[in-house]
Amino acid sequence: MSTTIEQPYVYRHRELVEPDWTRFPGWRDVTAQDWASAQWQRAHCVKNLKQLRELMGDLLTESFYADLERDQAERATMSMLVPPQMMNTMVPSTDEPMPAAGADFTRAFYADPIRRYMLPVFSDRRTDWPSHPHATRDSLHEHDMWATEGLTHRYPTKVLAELLPTCPQYCGHCTRMDLVGNSTPQVDKLKLVGKPVDRYAAMLAYLQQTPQVRDVVVSGGDVANMPWKNLEGFLDKLLEIDNIRDIRLATKALMGLPQHWLQPDVVEGVGRVAAKARQRGVSLAIHTHVNNAQSVTPLVADAAKAMLEAGVRDVRNQGVLMRGVNDSTEQLLDLCFALQDDAMITPYYFYMCDMIPFSEHWRLSLAEAQHLQHSMMGYLPGFATPRIVCDVPFVGKRWVHQVDSYDTERGMSFWRKNYRTSIEGADTEALSRDYVYYDPIYTLPEAGQQWWREQGDHEATHAAAVEAAAASREASLV
Ligand code: SF4
C-alpha cells in the first residue's frame, strides 16, 4: 500500500480508451457491432476454465489455469462470471505493447487489478489466515435485519431492497456472497423462498406502512439482471408511495456491461421513470461499483451519460477498497478523476472490504484506510471526494475516522451507533453497545498476531474484547 504521491501533484487528464478486444485469440473476429450488443456480451461471458482457455489461447501458461482451478475448488465464494467488457479491461495494453504470450503475459495477468478481484487464484490468498476467525457468510447481518424477505431495514430512514440474487458479473469479494450467484464447492447459497411477485408486494406493503422510510436502494444482485418491464413496474409502484423521496438503483453493470444500459428500450424506460420521479419530487440516481481506472472506458462513459440524459439526477460510484486493486493514493485518484472528468460519475464511497470468508488478502487494516483517506483529501472537489467507510456489522456505514477506540495491536476497532431502527425497538442497549470490526491478522504487529494464534475460543475472545472496550470507556469518562 502506498500513500505517497509525487509532490507537488501535477494533474494530468488521460483520454479514455476502449482496449482492442481482438488482441485476445478467441475474439479475433468479433465485430464492433457484436461488441456493442448486450445480448452478445451476455452470451460470451467467461463462466469456466474451458471458456477462459478458448478465449486466451496460449497467452496464459498452464500453471495459471491450475492456480485458478484450485481456487475454484477450495476457496472461491463466488462462481465465475466475467462479461467480455470486463475481460477486455484486463492487461489492456493501451499505453504499451501487449506482453508476449506465455510467461510475460501471465505475469501481467497475475498483477492486473481487475483480474485480482474478478478471477482470484489460489496463490492470491493468504495461507496463514485465509479467513479472519470472525468472518461470516452474511458479514453485515443483513438477513437479521430483513423486515420482509430481501428488504433490509438497518437505518432509521432508508432501506435496501434486494430484488434478485443474480448479477451479469460476479465479483470474487462480493459482500452478499451468502445469497448472490450460484453455489460454489465452498458455499451452498441461500435461496430466496418467496415468489418474486409476492416478495415485491411484501416490500411495497412494508414501505407503505412505514412512513419514516424515505429512501430505497433498489438492488440485488444487480438490477441490470431484472427484465426492464418488471423493474419499471416495481419502480412505478414505489413512486406511488408518498414517503419515498430518494430511489437509488444499484448496478455494477453500468461498468461491467454498459451495453445493457445503452439499449434503446432501457434508455427510454429510464427516461419514463425519471420523468415520473421528477414530477413527484423524487431523486432517482444510479449507484455503480468501479474499483480501478482501467474499467472506465468510453463505453462506460457513454452509458453513464445516457442515464443522465434520460433524466436520472446523478450517477455515483461506490467502490471497494482492496489490496492489489486500488490500495494506493495514485490509483484512487486516477479512478476518481476518470469517473468525475470523463464519465460524469461522482466518486462517492469506497467501502472497506467486508469480513467474508477467504477475503483476508484483499482486506486493508483500518489504519491503512485512514491513511488513504487522509492522502486523498484536497485533490478533488469536495462533493466528489469519496469517503472511505467501514460497514460495521449491526451498525452501518461509518467514516473511517469516526472510530470510537482502536486496539492496533490486536486489530480491533470499536464503533458506536447513533440510532435504533424499527426492528431494534426493544433493544435499549443498542446505542451504548460497542460494535467491533477486525483488521486482517497478518497486518498486525507480531505481539498481536501471537495473541490471535493463542486464542482457542474466538467467540469468547470477541465477547471479552467488547467488554474490555466498554470498561475502558467507562473509566475514561469518570
Ligand atoms: S455486482 Fe455487486 S452484488 Fe453482484 S457480485 Fe459484484 S459485488 Fe456482488
Image (cartoon, grey):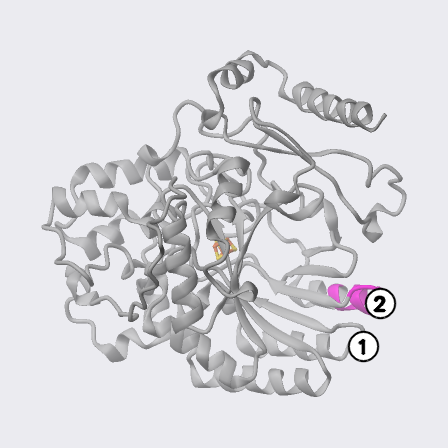
Q: Which residue is mark 2?
A: 211
Residue drawn at x 66%, y 39% is 403
- Residue at 48% x, 21% y: name it: 445
Q: Residue at x 83, y 64 (%)?
A: 212
* Mark 2 or mark 1: whose residue is earlier in sequence: 2
Of residue 52 and residue 323, the one placed in the foreground of this image is 323
Label 2 neighbour load within 10 Å: few <14, some 14-19, many 20+: few
Q: Position of residue 344 (x, y in %)?
A: 46, 74
Q: Amino acid at mark 1?
A: Asp
Position of residue 152 relative to residue 102, above or below, is: below
The image quarter containing residue 305 is: bottom left
How many C-alpha atoms fall within 10 Å of the one at disc 1: few (<14), some, or many (≥20)?
A: few
Q: Position of residue 115 (x, y in %)?
A: 32, 49
Q: Quadrant of the N terminus?
A: top left
Q: Secondary structure at mark 2?
A: loop
In the displayed orientation, state which residue is furthest to the front.
Answer: 8
Q: Check if residue 232 falls in the magenta segment.
A: no
Q: Is residue 158 left or right of residue 392?
A: right
Q: What span is colored magenta in the figure?
A: 203-213
Q: Please identify the quarter of the rendering in which residue 147 is found.
A: bottom right
For the residues bearing labels 2 and 1, Cβ distance under 8 angstroms: yes
What residue is shown with label 1? 242
Q: Is residue 438 left or right of residue 174?
A: right
Q: Is residue 20 visible?
A: yes
Q: Position of residue 192 (x, y in %)?
A: 63, 53
Which quarter of the image is occupied by the C terminus? top right
> Foreground residue, 475 or 323?
475
Q: Is residue 132 above or below residue 455?
A: below
